[in-house]
Image (cartoon, helix red, strand yellow):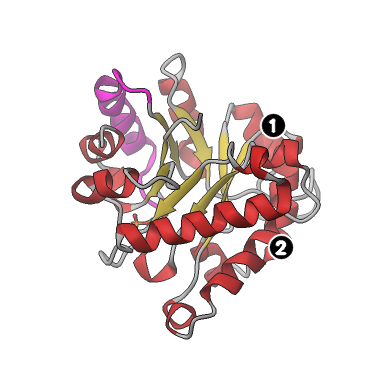
Amino acid sequence: MRIPFIAGNWKMYKNRSEAKAFAEEFKALYGGTDVKAAVCVPFTDLDILVEAFRGTGIGVGAQNVHFEDEGAFTGEISADMLKEIGVDFCIVGHSERRQYFAETDGTVNLKVKKLLEKDIRPIMCVGESLEQRDSGVLYDFIKSQLKGGLEGISAEDAEKIVIAYEPIWAIGTGRTATPEQAEEMCAFIRGTLIEMYGEETADEVIIQYGGSVKPANATEIMNQDEIDGALVGGASLKPADLMAIIDF
Ligand code: PGA
């Protein structure tokens, strides 16, 4: 039984006072749901949300991590540092990080392994560009991202990883994949996980869809069999919108 899981991705939005105001408002709205929720926020907001959400069941996530324990890596943050704050999740391999910060399947793989070692659940993003979709290489591409990101990871660990399917052309564009397109790829991802780990493990993995998810389209996306949740960017910045998605 997979429990639906909606995660917000604030990207580089909200300072500490805005984060605090969000947390207070969201806490008051959240409840009466079996859907799991988390918000992935800038590093500087993490402690505020951990504190505000204590005892509520709402998770807190980071958006990046370094794959080494410590060292001369100016500007980076380690998994131990996140763990010390009380972070539950961390996004890895978001397309914006792949595009602007040279994230590769290799570094994604190292980060996923480090997070698992430190007991933080990775939300590993995969997704094709519009050219890849139009030229028909999308399935091979998604499979290579999955195989690269999950290389050397055991079945037991794979169950703890959340996979977020985020077609690049649907992120922040207002152009959502149709529920059928999203379902088709999430089913393909599940199929690839079956090939890699067997049915029992693949059945446990939460697969999210991400890309212009909002209250108006959350129901039809969440009603798809192979879609277990959503990774929500823009619409996660407003407590009422995020709650409406959770209440799909
Ligand atoms: P969006 O972003 O919901 O604003 O399209 C999704 C994401 O990048 O995770």
Residue 158 shows in this picture: yes
- Badge 2 density bin: few <14, some 14–19, many ≥20, Cα 10 Å: some
The answer to whether mark 1 is within 8 Å of ligand 1 is: no
Q: Is residue 159 left or right of residue 31?
A: right
Quick check: is 45 in the magenta stretch? no
**Which region shows up in magenta?**
11-34
> Residue 212: image x %, image y %?
30, 58
Ligand number 1: quarter of image: bottom left
Between 94 and 170, the one nearer to me in the picture = 170
The mark lying in front, picked from 2 and 1, is 2
Secondary structure under tag 2 reads: helix
Of all residues, the one furthest to the front in this rendering is: 199
Quick check: is 25 in the magenta stretch? yes
Residue at the spot of label 1: 119
> Residue 43: image x %, image y %?
52, 42
- Badge 1 density bin: few <14, some 14–19, many ≥20, Cα 10 Å: some
Which quadrant is the C terminus positioned in?
top left
> Residue 178: image x %, image y %?
30, 62
Q: Is residue 43 left or right of residue 172?
A: right
The disc at residue 148 is: 2
